[in-house]
Image (tube, grey):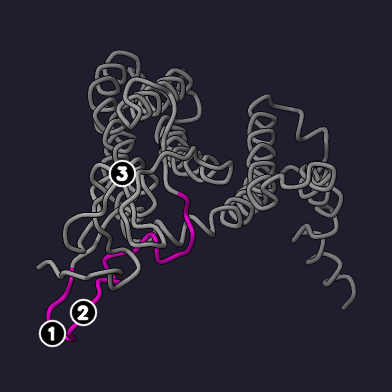
Amino acid sequence: MAVSISSTCPGTYCGRMLVNGSVEGDCGVCPRGERANLQNVCERCTESPELYDWLYLGFMAMLPLVLHWFFIEWYSGKKSSSALLQHITAMLECGVSAAVTLLVMEPVGKLSVQSCRVQMLSDWYTMLYNPSPDYINTLHCTQEAVYPLYTIVLIYYAFCLVLMMMLRPLLVKKIACGLGKSDRFKSIYAALYFFPILTVLQAVGGGLLYYAFPYIILVLSLVTLAVYMSASEIQSFKNLTAKKKRLVVLFSHWLLHAYGIVSISRLDKLEQDLPLLALVPGPALFYIATAKFTEPNRILSEGGSGH
């Protein structure tokens, strides 16, 4: 239902169309790629995303890749030579999907994005802010006020899923000969579960993730690094450098630490923010330095000798 307003529109996200330099029509929802400005006029989204916006998109793009790698490693077995090729294929799928997603967004055919600025948390949940001017009829102004940060992630996940279903089954069938018939496709089955979960997560919690993702990255990367080093019984630099795989895992976590620090600081003041990156190796060094003091067997033996 449209409500005619002479000067301004009710609600935060309702607006009127701008046609040939003059405001026309009734208050209502703005077309896709536009949002209402302070004068309640629908305005085209023509700005470039900020660094923080790109970091958020990078985080959402990393989630399926990290999950792919985790389940490939989990189901491929320790001696499987197919794991590396599957890892590379998963990276290729996500990389191509990201490029195609950027190309199909405005401006079409360019690896760039035009966006509207995120101003507040409610921008992500405009469906909750439809006004009722007469307290009876609701004026529906639900739109993507954070264009295209909400839908671009969903489009990316769709491309990732399509590419995975086109490439991975053929690859796994040819190279995963060392695994049983029921095991070789389990990493693909896992993706068929986590893609819907990621989609719902973005659809429902996109706004919350937008503000919380730097802290999520830091906490999860610290916890997973500690769990990995504990499970691998890494208690010295010698243990750490004994296998190349351990160094790869360590450097991957360091990149995530740095990503989280940059996302929190946003590099607003380079001379103050860049030195924070020196903290990246800190957790691993602290773990190695204190691991020998927290060894359960040692604690039990000392407790037993004390009695």
Magenta segment boundaries in residue numbering: 117-139
Q: Mark 3 points at which residue?
A: 33
- Residue type (three-letter) at the residue carrying disc 2: Ser
Is 27 placed left or right of 115 in the picture?
left
Q: Earlier in the sequence, mark 3 or mark 1?
A: 3
Asked if 7 appears above or below 224 in the picture, the reply is below
How far is mark 2 from mark 3, CA to CA?
24 Å
Membership of 127 in magenta stretch = yes
Secondary structure of the residue carrying tag 3 is: loop
Is 113 placed left or right of 40 in the picture?
right
Q: Are marks 2 and 1 in contact (CB under 8 Å)?
A: yes
Which disc is residue 5 wearing? none
Residue occupying image coordinates x 83% and y 72%: 303
Which disc is residue 132 wearing? 2
Q: Name the residue under label 1.
A: 136
Q: Where is residue 16 in the image (x, y as percent from the top left)?
A: 24, 57
Q: Position of residue 53 (x, y in %)?
A: 51, 45
Residue occupying image coordinates x 41% and y 62%: 38
Q: In which quarter of the image is residue 105?
A: top left
